[in-house]
């Protein structure tokens, strides 16, 4: 088990599963969601539509899995982060659930390498420092309970998240 942090575009980094910061509709959007659907092509949306037909979307804090189309991955795991709304609406617990539920799906599909964006820290305005602490704690505690190793890579698009994640993981600058 290993946790790494890199700076870059998550659509460019090979993994067994790439996690997407989606919304409850699963129909795509801006930010990393837009980048993943653009780079992966229409097959991802087709798979999302099948899930929508089956269960009507995805609730905040939960996750679903699809194929990865043209991306360098086997799967995309779509999870829905909480919109930051002052912190009194269960946002922290919901964000931790995103990481946990995504890793559960990855494990159930025998994924060894999983990449995560900084869920909720863009359009959903979750404070980045809090989000970094929650992400690291949730991933560490999930991995600690797993006999089979999963490697997690946090792929940070912006410098601030990159520095915060490195600090949380106590990686030298
Ligand atoms: N690779 C890695 N990280 C990225 C990339 C990329 N290509 N592009 C952006 N980020 P956001 P949210 C980072 O807004 O806050 C969508 O419209 C970005 O810098 O993508 O969870 C969905 O459909 C930020 O740190 O997701 C939802 O409606 C992080 O990804 C809504 O946005 C998350 O930013 C979800 O909002």
Image: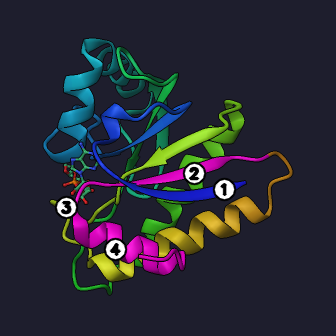
Distance between mark 4 and mark 3 Cα atoms: 16 Å
Q: Is residue 46 above or below residue 83?
A: above
Q: Name the residue furthest right.
A: 147
Q: Confirm or deny contact between disc 2 and disc 1 (CB under 8 A).
A: yes
Q: Counting residues from the N terminus, which is met first, the one under dot 3 or under dot 2? A: 3
Magenta segment, which residues?
149-173
Image coords of residue 61 (percent x, y): 44, 58
Q: Which residue is painted at 58% across and 74% down in the image?
A: 137
* The label number, if any, that marks residue 153 in the structure image: none
- Is the residue marked by circle 4 packed among few (<14), some (14-19), or many (20+) residues within 10 Å? many
Q: Counting residues from the N terminus, which is met first, the one under dot 2 or under dot 1? A: 1
Q: Secondary structure at mark 3?
A: loop
Q: Nearer the viewer, mark 4 or mark 3?
A: 4
Image coords of residue 96 (percent x, y): 50, 68
Is residue 20 shown left or right of residue 77?
Answer: left
Is residue 53 shown left or right of residue 39?
Answer: right
Q: Between residues 82 and 157, which one lies in front from this camera angle?
A: 157
Q: Which residue is painted at 35% across and 15% down in the image?
A: 70
Residue under circle 2? 152
Q: Which residue is painted at 54% across and 80% down in the image?
A: 170
| Beta carbon of the mark 3 residue lies under 8 A of ligand 1 | yes
Image coords of residue 104 (percent x, y): 65, 47
Q: Counting residues from the N terminus, which is met first, the one under dot 4 or under dot 1? A: 1
Quarter of image, res 10: top left
Residue under circle 3? 122
Distance between mark 3 and mark 2 Cα atoms: 20 Å
Residue under circle 1? 2
Residue under circle 4? 163
């Amino acid at each position: 088990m290993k946790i790494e942090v890199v700076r870059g575009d998550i659509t460019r980094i090979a993994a067994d599963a790439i996690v997407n910061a989606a919304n409850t509709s699963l129909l795509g959007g801006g930010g990393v969601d837009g980048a993943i659907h653009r780079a992966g092509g229409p097959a991802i949306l087709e798979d999302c539509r099948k899930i929508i037909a089956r269960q009507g979307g995805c609730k905040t804090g939960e996750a679903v899995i699809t194929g990865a189309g043209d991306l360098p991955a086997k799967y995309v795991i779509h999870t829905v982060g909480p919109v930051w709304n002052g912190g009194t609406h269960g946002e922290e617990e919901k964000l931790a659930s995103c990481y946990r539920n995504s890793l559960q799906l990855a494990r159930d599909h025998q994924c060894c390498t999983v990449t995560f964006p900084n869920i909720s820290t863009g359009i959903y305005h979750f404070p980045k420092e809090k989000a970094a602490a929650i992400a690291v704690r949730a991933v560490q505690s999930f991995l600690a309970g797993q006999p089979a190793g999963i490697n997690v890579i946090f792929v940070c698009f912006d410098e601030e998240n990159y520095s915060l994640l490195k600090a949380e993981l106590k990686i030298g600058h």
